[in-house]
Image (cartoon, rainbow, N blue to C red):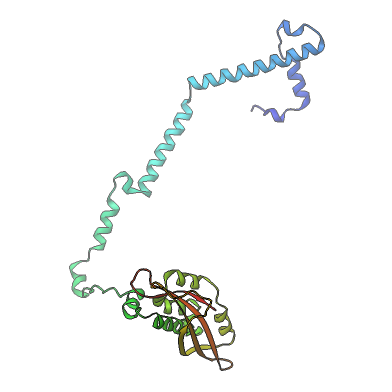
């Protein structure tokens, strides 16, 4: 087995250099000139050898043994493709078997009654949209705040449940924002083992520093009285500044809530 150049010892390298055949013109001159000439000669020989090997590989890019290995690999890929992807090679046996198995026999049809096609139920958004009244912004603010602050952690699971209940009265952007953010009021309610029920919601004019009403945007103040039953029963009042928009003319929806 030929040894790697990196594995040779310094003594072996010295013997190789000592036995290296140099032309007569390289041996002439001073010692430093001879060493430089020898180094350049070895570099030229090494470069010419690499060029010769590269040319031989170009003329004969593949040997018989290499060709046999490539043919074996191609045949192996073909066999594997036949088992793994029958349809890729035009083999439809699998598809035929699936079709035959899926077709029930007459006896099976007689024993079991045919299943009636189920009627798809309406999605929560479609049914909720048909039930809500979005014509009055004050009513929209009242219902949105009532549904959002009515909370039952044992049944709801997390704070997204009240968000979804109030979603028919809110814009999609507000729903996504509330559902993605942590709710300190919810965490407080859970820590006290409480269930919140909204007793009343009063809607009135918004704070004076908020924008005035326009045909497509209004602000209202919604004050909710909430009864909490838990480790300690108590009642709290929550005042929220609610913005509603009707840019598309299809109804008012809460687009922003201040005070949460």
Total numbered circles: 0
Give the farthest residue toward the right.
31
x 50%, y 86%: residue: 223
Between residues 179 and 169, which one lies in front from this camera angle? 169
Name the residue at 48% across, 89% down.
197
Side of 4 relative to 222 (left or right): right
Q: Residue at x 78, y 11 (%)?
A: 33
Residue 105: quarter of image: bottom left
Vertical relation: 87 (above or below) 107: above
- Relative image position of residue 224 (x, y in whole percent): 49, 87
Can you say which quadrant of the picture contains the N terminus?
top right
Residue in the foreground of this view, choosing between 69 and 5: 5
- 113 vs 66, left or right, is left
Residue 84 in picture, x, y percent from top left = 38, 49
Residue 179 against residue 199 in the figure, above or below: above
Residue 216 place in picture, x, y as percent:
39, 72
- Vertical order, 103 against 217 (above or below): above
The answer to whether residue 7 is visible is yes
Vertical arrangement, residue 101 with respect to residue 203, above or below: above
Task: Give the percent coordinates (x, y) of residue 245.
Answer: 41, 72
Q: Quadrant of the C terminus?
A: bottom right
Picture quadrant where residue 20 is located? top right
Can the viewer see residue 151 in this picture? no
């Amino acid at each position: 087995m030929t040894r790697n150049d990196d594995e040779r010892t310094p003594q072996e390298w010295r013997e190789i250099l000592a036995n290296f055949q140099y032309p007569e013109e390289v041996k002439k001159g001073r010692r430093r000139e001879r060493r430089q000439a020898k180094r350049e000669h070895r570099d030229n020989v090494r470069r010419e050898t690499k060029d010769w090997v590269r040319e031989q590989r170009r003329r004969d890019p593949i040997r018989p043994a290499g060709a046999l290995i490539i043919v074996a690999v191609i045949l192996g890929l073909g066999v594997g493709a036949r088992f793994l992807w029958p349809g890729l090679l035009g083999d439809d046996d699998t598809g035929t078997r699936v079709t035959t198995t899926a077709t029930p026999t007459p006896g099976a049809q007689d024993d079991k009654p045919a299943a009636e096609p189920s009627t798809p139920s309406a999605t929560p958004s479609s049914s909720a949209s048909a039930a809500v009244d979005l014509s009055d912004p004050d009513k929209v603010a009242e219902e949105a705040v009532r549904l959002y602050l009515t909370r039952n952690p044992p049944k709801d699971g997390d704070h997204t449940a009240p968000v979804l209940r109030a979603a028919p009265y809110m814009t999609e952007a507000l729903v996504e924002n509330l559902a993605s953010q942590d709710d300190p009021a919810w965490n407080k309610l859970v820590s006290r083992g409480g269930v919140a029920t909204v007793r009343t919601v009063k809607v009135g004019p918004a704070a004076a520093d908020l924008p005035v009403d326009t045909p497509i945007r209004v602000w209202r103040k919604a004050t909710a009285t909430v009864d909490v039953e838990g480790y300690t029963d108590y009642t709290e009042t929550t005042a929220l500044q609610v913005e509603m928009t009707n840019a598309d003319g299809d109804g008012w929806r809460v687009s922003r809530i201040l005070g949460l």
